[in-house]
Image: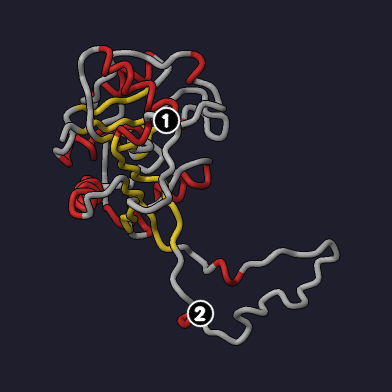
């Protein structure tokens, strides 16, 4: 089974400037995903999809393949991740490189480890799955949430769980954005319908599930990395 890892890292992030190459403990953000993918020893190809030659060179320095850059059409805010993945697969197919499975690894999940990638891959094989998606436990139960009327009244706000202790509530999970693995045939008709029979959840711990979108997320990632992973990187490019 030939498998490719695709790490989408376009330039021009609005929420956090140059987010995908922003140094985190001296290492550009995308570097963590490239290294984790390489350490997993699972992939026939680790590809970074970017529209920037600067980003591409950084990715190559960490061992990724970037034989081509994204088109302008796939580089804007409205370009979907699966459109990018499908286009990358088409470019490789045109070069005679076909893949059975693809794992999408977003660079905004720098605390995802090679062990997470291997476990998700193993789950994929054990279940003969069509897809595997990483999740983590929610910080707070959605049963503690409700909508508010215009006047802000909380009448009946917690009717469902008013007298239920936190420990008695069911456990809920959320998509954490760290790992998406699927059979490439699922992309033949457009964006894959992932959340159906044949897709399984790989559960990750919350401390490795940060998904960096803004400067607050970035600061949290720094704290988590220092506290849980005890890293001291100094390989800034």
- x 34%, y 22%: residue: 88
**Image location (x, y in percent) of residue 32:** 29, 37
Q: Is residue 219 above or below residue 145?
A: above
In the foreground, 181 or 75: 181
Callout 2 secondary element: helix
The answer to whether residue 128 is left or right of residue 173 is left
- x 46%, y 43%: residue: 212
Q: Which of the numbered marks, if any, corresponds to residue 10? A: none
In the foreground, 157 or 29: 157
Q: Read off the residue under disc 1.
A: 189
Callout 1 secondary element: loop
**Image location (x, y in percent) of residue 215:** 52, 41
Q: Is residue 40 above or below residue 115?
A: above
**Image location (x, y in percent) of residue 208:** 34, 53
In the foreground, 42 or 38: 42
- x 22%, y 47%: residue: 121
Image quadrant where residue 191 sits: top left
Which quarter shows the C terminus? top left
**Image location (x, y in percent) of residue 164:** 55, 85
Q: Which of the numbered marks, if any, corresponds to residue 166? A: 2
Q: Earlier in the sequence, mark 2 or mark 1?
A: 2
Distance between the Cα atoms at labels 2 and 1? 43 Å
Q: How is the image coloured?
A: secondary structure
Crowd around label 1: few <14 · some 14–19 · many ≥20 (10 Å): few
Labels 2 and 1 touching (C-beta < 8 A): no
């Amino acid at each position: 089974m030939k498998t490719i890892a695709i790490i989408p890292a376009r330039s021009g992030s609005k929420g956090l400037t140059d987010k995908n190459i922003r140094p985190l403990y001296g290492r550009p953000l995308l570097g963590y995903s490239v290294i984790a993918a390489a350490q997993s020893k699972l992939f026939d190809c680790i590809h970074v999809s970017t529209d920037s030659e600067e980003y591409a060179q950084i990715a190559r320095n960490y061992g990724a393949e970037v034989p081509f850059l994204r088109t302008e059409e796939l580089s804007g805010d409205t370009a979907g991740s699966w459109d990018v993945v499908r286009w990358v697969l088409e470019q490789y197919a045109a070069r005679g490189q076909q893949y059975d499975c693809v794992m999408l690894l977003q660079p905004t999940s720098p605390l995802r480890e090679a062990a997470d990638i291997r476990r998700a891959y193993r789950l994929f094989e054990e279940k003969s799955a069509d897809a595997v998606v990483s999740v983590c436990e929610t910080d707070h139960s959605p049963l503690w949430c409700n909508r508010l009327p215009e006047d802000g009244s909380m009448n009946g706000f917690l009717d469902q769980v008013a007298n239920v202790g936190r420990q008695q509530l069911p456990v809920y999970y959320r998509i954490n954005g760290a790992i998406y693995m699927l059979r490439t045939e699922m992309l033949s008709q457009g964006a894959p319908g992932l959340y159906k029979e044949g897709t399984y959840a790989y559960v990750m711990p919350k401390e490795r599930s940060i998904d960096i979108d803004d400067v607050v997320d970035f600061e949290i990632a720094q704290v988590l990395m220092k506290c849980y992973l005890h890293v001291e990187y100094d390989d800034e490019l």
